[in-house]
Amino acid sequence: MPPVPTFDDATNASIASIRRRQNDLREFQLPRLRSCSNSLTVQQEYAAEVREDLEAITRLVEVSSCITLFYSLIMECQ
């Protein structure tokens, strides 16, 4: 079995932030959008919030990947 990876504090914080945002999307935002029977304007606002959070998650994943790669390269050089 491969060893469990360990991450620096910044990566752990990014992972926690990603998980919180995913949970918010899954548990609150998507159900709210699905059940919305308000005006089209309100539905569009809810959809825009979902898109913004998905984009934020994407950026966090990209940054976390870069940090992890950078960290692993530093560890290899030591």
Image: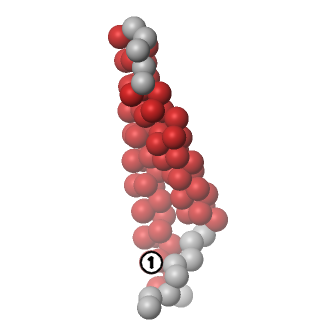
Is the residue 34 above or below the residue 13 in the image?
A: above
The spot of residue 63 in percent (x, y) is 45, 55
Note whether 25 is above or below 11 in the view shown.
Answer: above
Q: Residues within 10 Å of mark 1 (few under 14, many from 20)?
A: few
Q: Does the image show residue 14?
A: no
Q: Position of residue 16 (x, y in %)?
A: 58, 56
Q: Quadrant of residue 45?
A: top left
Residue at 45% from the left image edge and 32% from the top image edge? 31
The answer to which quarter of the image holds residue 7 is bottom right
Residue located 39% across and 47% down the image:
58
Type of amino acid at the residue the image marks with label 1:
Leu
Colour mode of the rendering: secondary structure
What percent of the width, then of the height, locates residue 3?
Answer: 50, 87
Q: Secondary structure at mark 1?
A: helix
Closest to the observer, 4 or 64:
4
Give the residue number, with chain letter if any, for mark 1: 73
- Vertical side of 24 occupied by 29: above or below: above
Residue 12 seen in the current view: yes
In the image, residue 13 lies at what x, y percent?
61, 57
